């Protein structure tokens, strides 16, 4: 019983703070203290400024040779690709509307790693988790975007668009900051203390502001539409995909930080960017919103259970 309570306390220490700040976002939106304009501006600020600053500082000041875990990144990339292929087969069998299949597939594999996944890793492993998760985030995010374009183009019968999306990926502030940080870290350049302190102010804003905006943007009324398809995607995102990656990680010998980062990043809810991409491409944006709501609420529970189980078996 004591071991169970220890594992429960460990898992809650990871997801509990996330739940509190998300709930605060919901409450502040409900009482009118923040509105759509705040959410829009705050989200843009996080995406374009504070999160890139956080990632740049965490990676650029790290000895890459000592901290980079190529096997973790490779497993994340290969596991994501396999999960995508399985989701395509599952969607073809279970989702009757062809135009909705890409939305379901994207929601099933594309994690909100930059906000919730990163917050999970920081809560669980501190700065070491931040560095490992940042490297993982940078490379797997590129694959997420490419696969999302492919599946949405297929289900919506669109042609083209891949080249323009790849240009967008190359201009992505997160990817730019990670590449620049890897360059600085590889050359072992010293960053002026003034820039470190200034950037630190921005980076410290990232997780609380991002989580408040995420909570405030949740629309529980949207769940009424396309509930069955949304549930298929949510079950895949919160259970099937994380279990697949965790099992693969255990099989290749991952333990501790490696396994924890893999589990936490894969069990994060569907990315908010999936809604933006679906809407821009003329897909079923209401379904994409439903998936985000379901997975954001469900991730707090499923991640807690996963971490509790891994902790009880002494895998973390």
Image (spheres, rainbow, N blue to C red):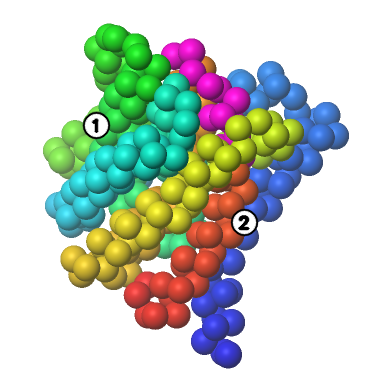
Residue range corresponding to the magenta coloring: 280-293
Q: What residue is disc 2 on?
A: 17
- For the residue labelled by badge 1, is the local secondary structure a helix, a strand or a loop? helix
Q: Residue visible at 27% across and 9% down? A: 160
Q: Residues within 10 Å of mark 2 (few under 14, many from 20)?
A: some
Picture coordinates of residue 184 (x, y %)? 21, 35
Q: What residue is disc 1 on?
A: 179
Determine whether, in the image, residue 286 is placed left or right of residue 71: right
Picture coordinates of residue 40 (x, y %)? 61, 21
Q: CA distance from mark 2 to mark 1?
A: 30 Å
Q: Residue visible at 70% across and 34% down? A: 224
Q: Quadrant of the C terminus?
A: bottom left
Q: Nearer the viewer, residue 10 or 312?
A: 312
- For the residue labelled by badge 2, is the local secondary structure a helix, a strand or a loop? helix
Q: Quadrant of the N terminus?
A: bottom right
Picture coordinates of residue 21 (x, y %)? 66, 48
Q: Residue visible at 46% across and 35% down? A: 95
| Residue situated furthest right in the rendering | 31
Check residue 288 for magenta coloring: yes
């Amino acid at each position: 019983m004591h071991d169970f309570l220890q594992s429960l306390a460990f898992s809650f220490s990871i997801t509990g703070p996330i739940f509190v700040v998300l709930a605060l976002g919901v409450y502040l939106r409900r009482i009118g203290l923040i509105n759509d304009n705040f959410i829009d501006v705050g989200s843009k600020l996080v995406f374009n400024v504070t999160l890139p600053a956080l990632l740049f500082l965490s990676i650029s000041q790290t000895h890459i040779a000592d901290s980079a875990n190529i096997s973790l990144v490779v497993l994340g990339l290969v596991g994501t690709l396999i999960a995508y292929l399985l989701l395509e087969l599952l969607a073809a069998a279970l989702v009757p509307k062809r135009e909705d299949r890409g939305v379901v597939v994207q929601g099933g594999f594309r994690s909100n790693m930059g906000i919730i996944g990163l917050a999970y890793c920081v809560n669980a492993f501190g700065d070491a988790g931040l560095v490992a998760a940042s490297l993982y985030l940078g490379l797997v995010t590129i694959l997420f975007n490419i696969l999302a374009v492919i599946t949405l183009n297929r289900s919506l019968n669109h042609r083209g668009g891949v080249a323009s999306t790849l240009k967008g990926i190359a201009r992505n502030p997160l990817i730019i900051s990670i590449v620049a940080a890897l360059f600085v870290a590889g050359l072992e350049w010293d960053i002026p203390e003034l820039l470190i302190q200034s950037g630190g102010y921005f980076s410290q804003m990232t997780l609380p502001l991002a989580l408040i905006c995420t909570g405030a943007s949740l629309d529980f009324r949207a769940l009424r539409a396309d509930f069955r398809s949304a549930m298929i995607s949510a079950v895949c995102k919160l259970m099937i995909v994380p279990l697949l990656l965790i099992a693969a990680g255990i099989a290749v010998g991952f333990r501790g930080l490696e396994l924890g980062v893999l589990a936490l990043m894969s069990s994060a809810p569907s990315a908010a960017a999936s809604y933006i991409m679906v809407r821009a491409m003329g897909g079923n944006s209401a379904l994409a919103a439903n998936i985000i709501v379901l997975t954001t609420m469900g991730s707090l529970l499923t991640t807690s259970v996963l971490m509790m189980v891994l902790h009880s078996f002494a895998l973390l």
